[in-house]
Structure formats: structure tokens, C-alpha cells
Image: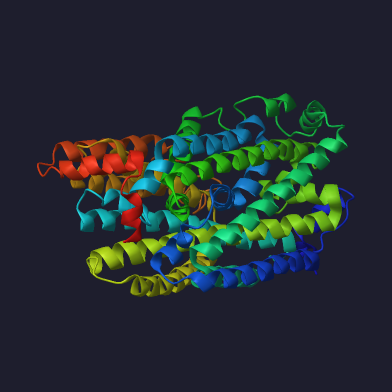
Amino acid sequence: MSSTLTSPLLWAAESQDTPVNNPILNISIFLAFVVVTLVIVFRASRNNRSAADYYAAGRSFSGPQNGFAIAGDYLSAASFLGIVGAIAVNGYDGFLYSVGFLVAWLVALLLVAELMRNTAKFTMADVLAFRLKQRPVRMAAALTTLAVCFFYLLAQMAGAGGLVSLLLGVDSRVGQSLVIAIVGVVMIVYVLVGGMKGTTWVQIIKAFLLISGVFIMTVWVLWQHGFNFSDVLDDAVSNSISDPPEALLAPGLQYGALPIDFVSLALALVLGTAGLPHVLMRFYTVPTAKEARRSVVWAIWLIGIFYLFTLVLGFGAAAMVGSETIVNAPGGVNSAAPLLAAVLGGPVLLGIISAVAFATILAVVAGLTITAAASFAHDIYSNVVRKGEVDSQAEVKVARRTVLVIGAVSILGGIGVQGQNIAFLVALAFAVAASANLPTILYSLYWRRFTTRGAVWSMYGGLITCVVLIALSPVVSGSETAMLGPNVDFAIFPLSNPGIVSIPLGFLLGWIGSLTDRNEESKKLAAEMEVRSLTGHGAEKAVEH
């Protein structure tokens, strides 16, 4: 194998005098995870008889179980590899991502979780269509849901190819494409066979493995420094490439030039989580609203602990690997956590972390796929095309066929965006969720005057604004890291994330649309929805139907 095709971790390990990477071990551990989870998925599929079984796992999971599943859904490869790398290179500013992701769950807990579980049946559109006109609202909600899932799926699938290049030394486009196809096929099997129940168990196992692996690495880093975090920070500063090195511990290293860019990103992260459809759908897998609330509390604890671990791992990577080594590695900042694993525990720990990273991608894409399939089958096919005149078995058949289509599109899309800057896809997913989904959810739950026109304007307006502003931003053209490169430049919007514009606009359009709509919605239904959302009275009866 030529030096240009040498595994990045082999190169980095040699530069650090640590044990070399072992791709066979990495693949073996990952295959063991796939085999075990597939067995569980097939066992879980035995009880998939109705739409409630397939979409909501028969509402059979407890709060703690669903909390682990939510954590598994939420902690993507970006959370693990991306944030550790951001902290290792940008220090304080990198940790702001962790803060934003965690604070977002307080919004979900306080404003959305329990009320959503009381009001809806399977999807976000159920909340909006409760007292508004079914067809236009469900169509708009389904389109925004599919948009969020599609952008998120593309990022995860493309990330699978990049992760293989980083961990296994597969640098060829054909090799990465093959891995993306394998990830897509396994994901299709998870969702097609296991439904929400099988997917949830995959999420639970993945969350346990991820948090356990990160915990082991955290303790190891602290042990190497006498369990003194100040020593970790001192070593991180001494190995920093920032100027001056002490800037690693101060704000402004990444966002000092344009602080409003971080404000825009923070708005999207904090508000977008409560509007992510694959997260909202998890609230329906528990039997009661109380369990929904418990699941979010468990998720906050698990996610919060995870992000505290990333703080240690990020500065630990800077201290023990060095910022310059991380930046110059073929994987860039995303190589920080694997490089740290190689330094700490050699090929065995690296193999475990590699498998966990692969499992992370698999679990997240499975959750996104079943959410997209449920949205199409339940909202568009069952309630818009067939106007509610379809039985649950026929609806599940359509959902399964949709899984095949979504899987194929995700594989082709992931292959198509290989080597591109995919950060804009994640940013776009969160921005759409915060701009189009969250305003309509909050207005539906808390404002009786909200109307169908307000919902449609808000969702379509938020979606279109996000897509247009991202297309005209530096993440697509005109910058060194742009998707189309620095030579193509049509960027007229200065920020990397449109949240600071699109989120207020989404709320404003919902407000204006409602006030100008002369066709007021049923006050009786609005009152009934308020009672149901706050007390849960009548919710279980509606779910059974």
C-alpha cells in the first residue's frame, strides 16, 4: 500500500510512537455489533402487527428506556467526532456546541414533550391537524419533516464514507461508496423488519456503548494526568497552535471575528432540537405523558454527562495528541477522538471506538428513516391521498415500501456528496426544524387564534427561507471550505447559518397568517386540544383509534 493510501491513524500513530491501527479488528468489532443488533431486531419484529406497533413500538417502552433511545438518536457522529475535534482545536468556542445541544433539551422538556405526547398519535403533523384543516397542514408538515430527515440523512451517509477513510484507510471513491451502500442496506433491514421497536433497541444499545466508551476514555485521560483536570488544560495549551496558546481557553478563537454567526447557530441548535421530527416521534413510544417527561429527563442526564466527557476528551486530545497533529491528519478535526484512542489504548481501544462510531451512524440513520417513512405513509398517503380511509395494515405496507425508496435515495445522495463540505446539511436540518416546525408546534399548543393559513405560511416560509439563505451563504460558495470551492462565489448572505433570520421569520409568518385569516378555526377544537395537551384526557382513546 502506498503512503498516500496509508490509514490516517496508522500515520498519526507512527508520528506519536503509539501502536498502529488495525482495520481488521475495527471491522470485526463493528460486524459483531451488527450481528447482535440484527438478532434483536428480528426478535422485536414478531410483534409488529399494527401501525402503532410499527410507528410507535406499541407504546411499550418505559421512560428510562426511551431516554436511552433518545440519547442514541441525538448523539450522532457529529456529536462524538465533531465536538471533540472542535474542542481540541478551538477550545472554549468548540465547547459552546455542547452547551447549545444540551440547553436545547430544556426547551424540549419544558415546552414540547408532555404536550406532544398527549395530543398526537404518531407524527408531528397529528398535533397541527388536530384543530386545523387536515390536507394543507399535513402536506406542509410532511414536507418539512422529509426535508429535515433528508438533509440529516445525507450528512450521516456521507459521514460514513468519510469515517471509513479516516479509520480504515479506504481512500478510494469506490471503496467509500461501497461502505455507504453497506450502511444503507443494513439501515433498511433494521427499519424494514424491526420498525420502531427494533430501531429503538438499536438506539439503546448504541447509546450504552457510546457513553461507556467515552467514559472509559475520559477516566483514562484523567488517570494519565493524576486526575487533575488543570494539568490536562496546561498540557493542551502547551500543545496548542493558537496564537497566543492561551487563547485556547478563552472565548473568541473560532467566532471572534463574527460573533453574530455563533448567535445564529446557537438559535438553530437550541430551538431546532424541539422541532426535529425524529426526536419528536420518540415521545409516542411510551404509554403515557408522564413517561414522555421521564424519558426527556433521562435523556438530559445522559446527554449532559456525555457532553461533559467530550470536554475532557477534547482538551485531552489537544494535550496528548497535539492540535497540529490533529489539524494535519487526513481526517482533520474529526480525527481527534480516534487519534486519542490510538494514543491511549492502541488498536484495541481504537477498534472499540471505531465500532461505536459506525454504530452511531447506523442508529441515527435508522431513526431518521422510520420517521420519514411514517410521515409519508401516515400523513401524505393515509390522510391526504386516501383521506383517512385506509386500514393500519395497508398503511404499514406503504411505510415499508417508503423505507426502500428512502434508503435508495439516501445511498445515492450520500455517494453524491462525498468529499463535499456537509456541515451545511446539518445546519440546514436544524435551521428548518427551528424555523418551520417549532413555530407551528408552539402556536398550535399555546395559541387558540392560530389558523391553517398561519401554519402553512410558517412552515413553507421557514423551509424556503432556510434553503435560499444557505444556498447564498459562504458554506456553499466563496470560501475555502465551501461546498463548491472558493473559485465559485455567489454568496451574498454573510452568515453560515440562517437561524437568526429564518427563525423569527417563521414565527412572524405564523402570526401574520393567522391574524389575516378570516376563516377562524373551531374554538371548540382549540379548547379540546388545550385540555388534552395539559391533562391527557381523551388522548389514550384517540391513540387507540
Which quarter of the image is occupied by the N terminus? bottom right
Task: Give above or below for 261 relative to 438.
Answer: above
Task: Give above or below for 372 relative to 537.
Answer: below
210 horizontally vs 20: left or right:
left
Residue at 32% of width from left, 45% of height from top?
Answer: 537
Closer to the camera in the image, 50 or 300: 50
Residue at 25% of width from left, 36% of height from top?
Answer: 447
Residue 373: image location, x then y, percent: 41, 65
Closer to the camera in the image, 278 or 492: 278
The color scheme shown is rainbow
Closer to the camera in the image, 221 or 160: 221
Residue at 71% of width from left, 44% of height from top?
Answer: 327
Toward which corner of the image does residue 219 lie, by quadrant? top right
Residue 503: image location, x then y, percent: 36, 38
Extreme residue toward the left, this view: 518
Residue at 28% of width from left, 54% of height from top?
Answer: 140
399 horizontally vs 440: left or right:
right
Does any portion of residue 120 appear in the rendered image? Answer: no
Which quarter of the image is occupied by the C terminus? bottom left
Residue 16: image location, x then y, percent: 86, 48
**Count of marks overlaid on the render:** 0
Does any portion of residue 313 appear in the rendered image? Answer: yes
Residue 63: image location, x then y, percent: 54, 47
